[in-house]
Every structure is written in structure tokens, then in C-alpha cells.
Amino acid sequence: MNEPAPAKSVKNYLWPWAIFALLGANMVIVAITVYASQVSRSPVESDYYRKALHWDDSARQQSLNTSLGWKLVPSLKKSDSGADLSLSLLDGKGEPIRTCKVSIEAFPFADPNHKLQTTIDAADAESLTAALAIDRPGLWRLSFVVDAGGARFTQQQDIELSEFGNIEVFLPNTPGGRP
């Protein structure tokens, strides 16, 4: 009656190791993800929390922009230093606004920390122009703040700059205006 116990097969010893291997692989993947999130230049909106707290201010400004009826149409022309930006700024009646201050901020969507800033301070100017050192192809966001006649107008514009210097401007606030 003392028969030897049947020998356990390799399968019986293998499954606990498979669980530990899967847990170890999961820990390695999590460690790689945490490391990549800390060292990459990911496209994250800067100061997002502060902007979220002031969302009501943004909504008020958007309402004011609509009531002003101003139109800001940028055009870009490739140059040796990057791009020459020309602005057409019209009031609600379609008349050009010649005396104003325009603050411009531009950044590529691929690297929002690479910000370009410039200001146009025009006093009875025929045209509003500025040079931007747009040095890489891709999708760019241009943000404009216009102060004229005691009013403030804001607009964001997305542009696509191809590798070959072709520039496509997407219209703001229109269906299909952005890729």
C-alpha cells in the first residue's frame, strides 16, 4: 500500500512562473512609460490649469470678439529667415484698422515649448507685417491679441507649413477649418 506518488509533470511547475513573468513584464512596461513621460517633449498645453480656471474670461472674450465683428486674416510668405507674416485687419464695417497693437505668439504643435513671440505696433500703417522665425515644417498655432481703439480682439489660427515651403491657412471657427 505504500505506492510512490506519481511524478508531477513540468506543466505543474511552469504555470506559477508564467504568472511571475507576466507581472514582471507589466512592471517593466510601466517603468518605461513613466520614464518616457518624464523625458519627452510631449505636446501638452502649457499652464492648462490656470486657463481652465479662467474659462469664463475666455468665453466673455469670444463673445466680445463676435460682437466687434472684426476680421483678422493672416498670410504667410516663405523667406530666408522663416516666414513673413502679413495681416489684414478689418472692423465690423469692412474698413481697415490702421492704428493698433498686435501681439503674436506662434508655436508648432509638435513642440509647444518652442514659442515665437513678436509685436506689431502700428500707428496709421498701410499694412501690418512681421517676421517670424518659423524654422520647421508642420502644423503651427498662431495666437493674436489686437488692441485698438480701447477694444481687445483675440484670435487663434492654425497653419500648415510643408517641407517645401507651401503654407496652408485654416480658417478659425468654421466646420472643417482645421485638419
Image: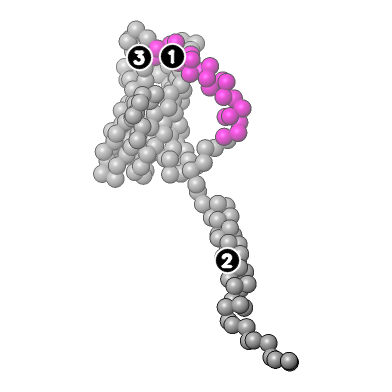
For label 2, the residue is 22
Say whether marks 3 and 2 touch (CB < 8 Å): no
In the image, the segment drawn in magenta is 48-70
Camera-near label (1 vs 2) is 2
Foreground of the two, 119 or 58: 58
Residue in the image at 60% along x and 62% along y: 27
Taking the image as shown, residue 58 lies to the left or right of residue 165, namely right
Taking the image as shown, residue 144 lies to the left or right of residue 15, namely left
Residue in the image at 40% along x and 19% along y: 122
For label 1, the residue is 66
Q: Mark 3: few, some, or many residues within 10 Å (few <14, many ≥20)? A: some
Residue in the image at 56% along x and 20% along y: 57
Q: Mark 1: few, some, or many residues within 10 Å (few <14, many ≥20)? A: few
Q: Which mark is residue 91?
A: none
Question: 31 above or below 127?
Answer: below
Indicate the amino acid at tag 3.
Answer: Leu
On the image, the x and y values in percent for residue 9 come to 59, 82
**Quadrant in which residue 81 is drawn:** top left
Indicate the amino acid at tag 2.
Answer: Leu
Camera-near label (3 vs 2) is 2
Between the residue at mark 1 and the residue at mark 2, the CA separation in whole angstroms equals: 56 Å
Residue in the image at 43% along x and 40% along y: 109
Q: Is residue 10 magenta?
A: no
Q: Secondary structure at mark 3?
A: strand
Q: Secondary structure at mark 2?
A: helix
Indicate the amino acid at tag 1.
Answer: Thr
